[in-house]
Image (spheres, grey):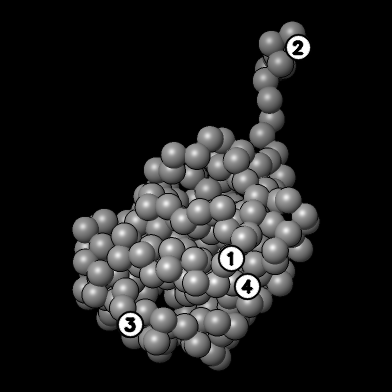
Amino acid sequence: MDTQAILRAYRRYARVYDLLFGAIFHPGREFIIRSLGARSGERILEVGVGTGLSLPLYPEHVKVTGIDISKHMLDIARKRVERMALQQVEGVMEMDAQNMSFRDSSFDKVVAMYVVSVVPDPIALIDEIRRVCKPGGDIYIVNHFRARNPLLAMAESLLSPISKLVGFRPDLDLDRFLEESGLDLVETHNVNLFGYWKLLRCRNREAVAFNPSEPAEQSP
């Protein structure tokens, strides 16, 4: 799956996205934003904000920035922000989540809803999310991962060849994703219809700063 395939898919979906995916994914959106426990003034980044369906759910005392690679989806998100006068939204920006222009440690919390399976490189995405999230901050991910049930897992594997057409990777394995991304998993919850999607709350590990005044440890 590549960026152009994703852009083509979301150009097709933009006008009908809310109708197709609004209600079915809404419980996950509500759950994740309730789980944030955001304090007043905290800056939150939502990666893959799409048409902005989640933006009205954020409390007024936070500052939210949304990014997405699809101009067509963002056009709808901007109209939503304007129509609903969402004061908590600092802006929605066209940006590749695998190569963000934000400075390191720009956000207290980062949210990625239904986006890990639709980027070309999920690990590059997580690397960027960890970079822009403050050390010790929380990272929230809602996504579908390969089913544990053998029959469902087989069906998902059969969908892999058409992933470019639908703009979605159906067979992402959770254990491998956590191992390769290095995410520090705190808790998981099943969300949405039949609990088919998972919410992951992860802690952005504190970076260990190197102090040149301290002697380096010597190997025995």
Instruction: Tell us which disc is closer to us: 3 or 1.
Output: 1
Tag 4 residue = 57
Mark 4 and mark 1: Cα distance apart in space: 10 Å
Q: Which of the pair 117/43 is nearer the observer?
A: 43
Q: Are marks 3 and 1 in contact (CB under 8 Å)?
A: no
Q: Amino acid at mark 2?
A: Glu
**Mark with earlier residue (3, 1):** 3
Q: Amino acid at mark 1?
A: Leu
* Quarter occupied by residue 119: bottom left
Mark 1 and mark 2: Cα distance apart in space: 49 Å
Tag 1 residue = 86
Is residue 54 toward the left or the right of residue 116 in the image?
right
Q: Position of residue 13 (x, y in %)?
A: 29, 76
Instruction: Tell us which disc is closer to us: 2 or 4.
Output: 4
**Mark with earlier residue (2, 4):** 4
- In the image, residue 128 above or below residue 148: above
Mark 2 and mark 4: Cα distance apart in space: 47 Å
Residue sitting at x 43%, y 43%: 100
**Mark with earlier residue (3, 4):** 3
Q: Which mark is residue 214?
A: 2
Q: Amino acid at mark 4?
A: Leu
Mark 3 and mark 1: Cα distance apart in space: 22 Å
Q: Amino acid at mark 3?
A: Val
Q: Are marks 2 and 4 in contact (CB under 8 Å)?
A: no
Quarter of the figure with the N terminus: bottom left
> Considering the numbered disc 2 on the image, is that residue within a helix, a strand or a loop?
loop
Is residue 3 toward the left or the right of residue 182 in the image?
left
Tag 3 residue = 16
